[in-house]
Image: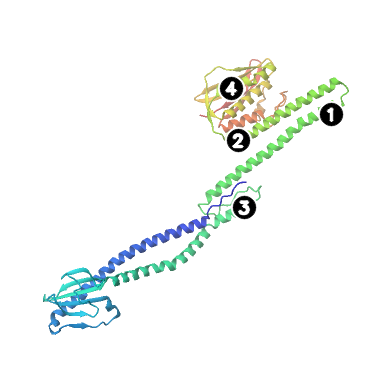
Amino acid sequence: MFEKRVNGSLKQRLLVLALTTVVVIWLAATAFTYFDAREEFGEILDAHLTQSAALLATQASHELNEVETEHTPLLHKYSLRVAFQVWEGGRLLRLHSANAPGLPLSDREQGFSDKVIDGHRWRVFSTWDDSGKNLVQVAELTRDREELSRDVAGNLLKPLWFSLPILALLLWLSITRSLRPLDKLTGEVAQRKPDNLAPLDAGTAPREVVPLIERLNNLFVRIDASMQKERRFTADAAHELRTPVAGIKAQAQVARSASSVTERMHALDNAIIGCDRAAHLIDQLLTLARIDTLGDETTEPCQLRALAAEMIASIAPTALSRDVRLELMEGEEIPVRGNPVLLRILLRNLIDNGVHHTPPGTTVRINVSAENGIARLTVSDDGPGIPEAELEKLGERFYRPLGTGASGSGLGLSIVKRIAEIHSASVQFSSSENGNRNGLEVMVVFRK
């Protein structure tokens, strides 16, 4: 049983990523705005203190001589935020606000300063009036300034809390709409029957989805071609297997009804020959079925001449029994890159085909050569040869030339051609003239 791995939804990933990005950027912008606004707000409040001090200094230089100690009233709720003091000669408190402490707001007589009085921190601006007799100090509680800064930051963050759910909803709707073509494609593929390999429509798909649809359509084409090929192969194999099975059955019936031992033994021998032919055909069919799987294996450098010598040694007993000589032409070793298992099958089928189609007392020649760096493998025999009109049909599955007189499945050269295709090689068939005989020459040309 295969464990199904469930990954996160693409829609959910996009939504989380978009919202996270927006929130991070928004918080960064808010933080920057908060600190920048706090700095600017502090400068504005400092400017307000300076302006208030200037007004008090102007008034004190003209009217303070007529006033002794006087407490000014608080006329506004925000008056509690600001306090002031006017010191005559810098020592005698002549005027102050109701919320001002009894101690000097600052030890400095000019400019800004910070001072803690009775546990409260003040931001103070000090200056002298035009006459130089009165020291004016205007101050504001630091906690009030910070409270105002927090209020500003809170107002900046409020739109985030209200707009974030709306933004999430809009993003979800947008992403859902954008991914609708993928959902449509998924549904279309899911509802298809196994034998429906028609191409998918990419006309209304987004540009990013079109490559996926094109690759799926290419896959459907390859699968359809493979299925058609397998159907033809199955039909041809069933047809070819029917003949030897029918022959074996006929010989068995003859043996059962034979009236003499000699007739019975002859029928049984023919049945054994039929079994051998059927076994050879099945072996060739299995080999043909294995080729594509073997072709996916990693290739490696192969010594073509050494492989040819190995196959000649394995087929030599069969050639000897048929009085056929096998000759490996002299030459240098030619390296090719390929699958050694498949190359052995190719060589075995070529040499075996030559042995079975050449008369006794003749020779099958195997030559490994190179021309302009291109490896060539040639196998030629002294058989009857093939008419020019039928050379193009060689290599087709189950094709056997008429009049050859040799038994076979018609798959040997088909296997050769398929292995050559896997190695990006080509197979050429031609007639070879050797004295008074016209044989068949098969050449496999490997690319660089």
Q: Earlier in the sequence, mark 4 or mark 3?
A: 3
Badge 2 local density, few (<14 within 10 Å), some, or many (20+)? Answer: few
The one nearer the camera, 307 or 96, is 96
**Tag 2 residue:** 293
Where residue 438 sits, quadrant-wise, is top right
On screen, residue 81 above or below 170: below
Q: Residue farthest to the right?
A: 259
- The numbered mark at residue 190 is 3
The first of marks 4 and 2 along the sequence is: 2
Q: Which mark is residue 308?
A: 4
Amino acid bearing label 1: Gln
Where residue 159 appears, as percent x and y from the top left, is 41, 68
Q: Quadrant of residue 226?
A: top right
| Distance between mark 3 and mark 2 Cα atoms | 28 Å
SS label for mark 3: helix
Residue 122 place in picture, x, y as percent: 24, 71
Residue 84 horizontal/vertical position (percent): 21, 76
Q: Which secondary structure, mark 1?
A: helix
| Residue 69 visible in the current orientation | yes
For the residues labelled 1 and 4, the Cα–Cα distance comes to 43 Å
Separation (CA) of disc 2 from disc 1: 41 Å
Q: Amino acid at mark 2?
A: Thr
Tell me the residue that label 1 is attached to: 253
